[in-house]
Amino acid sequence: MTPDLFARFEFECLPRIIDTIGRLHRRVQLHTLPADARDCPARLQLTGEGPPELRRYRFALDITLAWDGLEVQRLFGAGGDARFVAYLAALPGKLRAWQEPRGIDFDSLSQMDLSILIGGLDFEH
């Protein structure tokens, strides 16, 4: 795994993911987090806090998305551009699908657990 690919992911792909999520959930703050280790890609943190009395769940939104390093590497191989475009198109559905089973509510900016890590992500749609 080369750190160059992770840097490309951070500078070429993460901004497009941030833009896609930001257009869907305008009240969610999106922060790029540095990699945990040299052989890991950067992560994305989604945070937000609405009025406590309107929360569906107990805790304010604090979700970290972490992609699998091998999947990031595959993005820069043959067909990677098309896979990434399809992933971005599927991302709204993925976010909706994560809500109920993971105890997340983007509308009220709340979640069931103090923090949520959604890791090992790939770019399948």
Image (tube, helix red, strand yellow):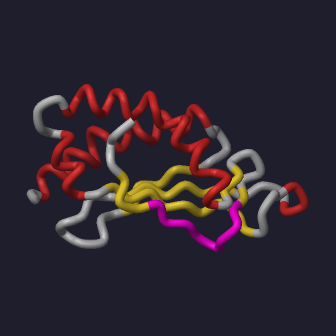
* Residue range (magenta): 111-118
In the rendered image, residue 52 lying in the magenta stretch gets the answer no
- Furthest residue in direction right, as rendered: 53
Q: In the image, residue 42 lies at what x, y percent?
A: 31, 58
Is 35 left or right of 90, judged from the image as shown?
left
Instruction: Work out whether 5 lies above or below 118.
Output: above
Q: Which residue is depicted at the point 48% across and 37% down?
A: 91
Is 104 left or right of 12, judged from the image as shown?
right
Q: Which residue is depicted at the point 38% across and 40% down?
A: 15
- Furthest residue in direction front, as rendered: 101
Q: Which residue is depicted at the point 61% across and 60% down?
A: 102
- Which quadrant of the rendered structure holds the C terminus? top left
Is 122 left or right of 71, judged from the image as shown?
right
- Which quadrant of the rendered structure holds the N terminus? bottom left
Q: Which residue is depicted at the point 21% across and 40% down?
A: 75
Q: In the image, residue 35 lies at what x, y percent?
A: 30, 65
Instruction: Work out whether 67 lies above or below 95.
Output: below
Is 63 left or right of 7, judged from the image as shown?
right
